[in-house]
Amino acid sequence: MKNYKKQTGIWLDFREAFLVTFDERNMGEPEFKRLRSHIEWGVPKGGARSKTAYGPQGGINERAFTDRRHHAEKVYFDAIIREINPNTDELVIFGPAEAKYGLQNAIENIKHYHPKITGVFAAEPMSQNQFMAKVRAYFANEIYA
């Protein structure tokens, strides 16, 4: 009996993620999913002015902004991990930003779930068809081109 593999490719940045899963057993259409993040963008704004004309100005709570950002990233990575097929054997991650490494770390820190991460690569934004073709070619060649 042939050992069939489920292979998943993920392209992500901090705004959205695309997942495509190929299953060798049923050579039908690959499974495609898209997720949006809810990560806060920009720089922290705010601060408070004193009621007196030249009184002290309250600072921006940059730590709270950073904490909210880290929490939103964790929620985003957890949502992506939930969408990965639990039977996935191999996984490749693409993306233009540092998000790909954050997802890699989140997956590696799960004790009960370890698909084989075959690669983490830089990649520019691409269309759905380009992304699916890139993942298919990656797993067909087993090398990054």
Image (cartoon, rainbow, N blue to C red):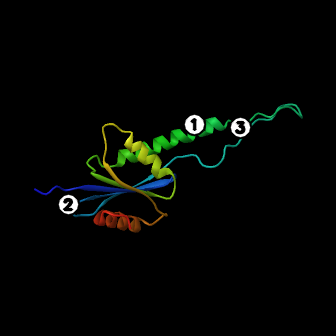
Q: Please tell me which of labels 3 and 1 falls first in the chain.
A: 3
**Frontmost residue, 47 versus 141:** 141
Label 2 is placed on what type of residue?
Asn
Amino acid type indicated by mark 1 = Asp
Residue corresponding to mark 3: 60
Q: Position of residue 23 (x, y in %)?
A: 24, 58
What is the CA distance from the residue labelled 2 to the residue labelled 1?
44 Å
Task: Identify which residue, 137 or 18, lies in the foreground.
Answer: 137
Disc 1 is placed on an element classified as helix
Quadrant in the rendering for residue 34: bottom left
Badge 2 marks a residue whose secondary structure is: loop
Question: Which residue is at 46% across, 45% downward?
Answer: 76
Residue 91 position within the rendered picture, expressed as x and y whole percent measured from the top left: 33, 53
As measured in the structure, the alpha-carbon distance from the residue carrying label 2 to the one carrying label 3 is: 55 Å
Q: In the displayed structure, does residue 141 sit left or right of residue 121? A: left
Residue 133 location (% of width, % of height): 35, 68
For the residue marked with disc 3, what is the amino acid? Answer: Ile
Residue placed at 50% from the left, 44% from the top? 73
| Residue under the image location 23 percent in, 64 percent down | 28
The residue shown at (44%, 54%) is 17
Question: At numbered mark 3, what does the secondary structure look like: helix, strand or loop?
Answer: loop
State the residue position of label 2: 26
- In the displayed orientation, state which residue is furthest to the left: 1
Q: Where residue 86 appears, x then y in whole percent? A: 28, 46
Mark 1 highlights which residue?
67
Who is closer to the viewer here, 73 or 94?
94
Q: Are marks 3 and 1 in contact (CB under 8 Å)?
A: no
Please say if 137 is above or below 99. Answer: below
Q: Quadrant of the N terminus?
A: bottom left
Mark 2 neighbour class, 10 Å CA radius: few under 14, some 14 to 19, many 20 or more: few
